[in-house]
Image (cartoon, helix red, strand yellow):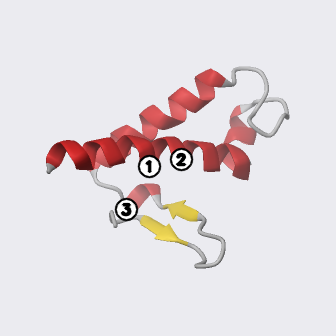
């Protein structure tokens, strides 16, 4: 597992990404994933509420969507590096 990515519980299989612990390459991929999800939902968030900067930072559904996109991106990076 990449440093900075943790499974919070075994039963729920939720994943928490600690941004400050990521490598520079992974930080770049996280930022791209965040921008992509934000651009897909310019007015309404993934959860259906009005999208503001504050809401994007605190919304668990938005963060889950970014994490999912991020894991797809680094999966591609890991495949290319092998």
Front tag of 3 and 1: 1
Q: Are marks 2 and 3 in contact (CB under 8 Å)?
A: no
Q: In the picture provided, is 60 more to the left or to the right than 77? A: right
12 lies above or below 81: below
78 lies above or below 10: above
Give the residue drawn at x 60%, y 22%. Answer: 39
Q: Residues within 10 Å of mark 3 (few under 14, many from 20)?
A: few
Residues at marks 3 and 1, CA–CA distance in whole angstroms: 15 Å
Quarter of image, res 44: top right
- x and y percentages locating residue 47 in the rendered image: 80, 40
Q: Are marks 1 and 2 in contact (CB under 8 Å)?
A: yes
Disc assigned to residue 21: 3
At mark 2, the secondary structure is helix
According to the picture, the residue beneath numbered tag 2 turns out to be 68
- x and y percentages locating residue 80 in the rendered image: 19, 42
Front tag of 2 and 3: 2
**Which is more N-terminal, label 1 or label 3?**
3
């Amino acid at each position: 597992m990449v440093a900075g990515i943790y499974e919070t519980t075994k039963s729920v299989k939720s994943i928490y990404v600690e941004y400050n612990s990521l490598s520079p390459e992974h930080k770049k991929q996280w930022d791209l994933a965040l921008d992509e999800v934000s651009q897909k939902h310019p007015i309404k968030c993934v959860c259906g509420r009005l999208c503001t900067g504050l809401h994007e930072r605190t919304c668990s559904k938005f963060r889950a969507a970014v994490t999912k996109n991020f894991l797809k991106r680094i999966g591609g990076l890991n495949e290319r590096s092998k």
